[in-house]
Image (spheres, rainbow, N blue to C red):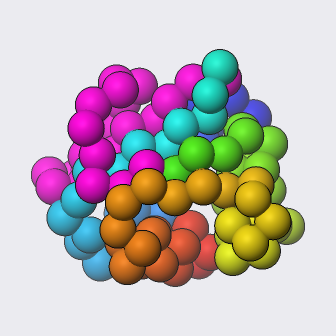
Amino acid sequence: MSLDSISDQIKQKLQFAPPINAKIKLDFGDEGIVFIDATQNPPEISDSDDEADLTLITKLDTFKAIVAGTQDPNIAFMMGKLKIKGSMGLAMKLNAILED
């Protein structure tokens, strides 16, 4: 699964989710960045490294497992596989969207 397919999956999940009105960055280190500007409707997804309200830092494989439903994001966070910078409340909203 590439960054493009992850971007497509996120775009599909955000279509049916309540608006979150925030900027979110998914930082996969050397594997790349996915930036979600959900202050717009529809949300704009890019690979820019802009300022975000929430940044999730993880490996691409861990995030793939979270989106696929085989990795619980809460467990990944507790195990140190997922780091959060920014609003924990926003992270919980995103968690609910990704789990659906």
Pinpoint residue 11: horizontal percent, then vertical percent.
43, 51
From what the image shows, is residue 14 above or below residue 50? below
Residue drawn where x is 27% and y is 55% of the image: 53
Q: Which residues are the magenta region?
A: 31-55
Extreme residue in the left direction = 40
Where residue 71 sits, quadrant-wise, is bottom right
Pinpoint residue 28: horizontal percent, then vertical percent.
62, 34
Where residue 81 sits, quadrant-wise, is bottom right
Q: Nearer the viewer, residue 46 or 16?
A: 46
Query: What quarter of the picture does the N terminus occupy?
Result: top right
From what the image shows, is residue 56 above or below residue 17? above
Residue drawn where x is 42% and y is 73% of the image: 88
Pinpoint residue 45: horizontal percent, then vertical percent.
35, 38
Magenta includes 63? Answer: no
Task: Give the side of residue 38 with respect to residue 27, left or right.
Answer: left
Task: Give the side of residue 76 with respect to residue 11, left or right.
Answer: right
Residue drawn where x is 68% and y is 29% of the image: 2
Total number of numbered discs in the rendering: 0
Pinpoint residue 76: horizontal percent, then vertical percent.
76, 65
